[in-house]
Image (spheres, helix red, strand yellow):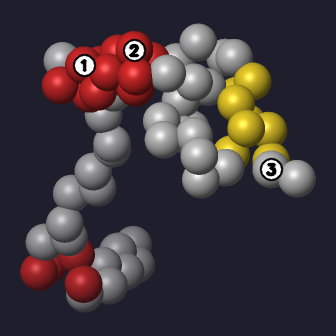
Amino acid sequence: MAAIVDCPTCGAKVEWKEENRYRPFCSLRCKQLDLGAWAEEKYVIPVANPLDDTDDEPTPPAPAP
């Protein structure tokens, strides 16, 4: 028995099986709508800024008063 998943675009129930060539989408239309959203940058993957060389060293303690 194949797993049932929700289409990421429209929410329709989709069987996750090899015969479903659009999985996890329910149709070519939903697959293309999702691709278009990525192309229009409606979805983004957050990127962490790389650390500077100075960030690798611990900060020295503040001088005592």
Q: Going by the image, does 52 lie left or right of 30?
A: left
Q: Which residue is mark 1?
A: 36
Q: Which residue is mark 2?
A: 29
Quick check: 15 above or below 49? above
Quick check: 60 above or below 44? below
Residue 28, image quadrant: top left
Mark found first going from the N terminus, 1 or 2: 2
Residue occupying the point 75% across, 24% down: 13
Mark 1–mark 2 distance (CA, rounded to whole Å): 10 Å
Q: Residue furthest right?
A: 1
Q: What type is the residue that disc 3 sits on?
A: Ala
Mark 1 Cα within 10 Å, few/some/many (few <14, many 20+)?
A: few
Mark found first going from the N terminus, 1 or 3: 3
Residue occupying the point 57% across, 40% down: 20
Q: Secondary structure at mark 2?
A: helix
Q: Which residue is mark 3?
A: 2
Mark 2 Cα within 10 Å, few/some/many (few <14, many 20+)?
A: few
In depth, the one of 33 and 54 nearer the eye is 33
Q: Give x and y (percent) for residue 56.
A: 24, 84
Is residue 42 in view?
A: no
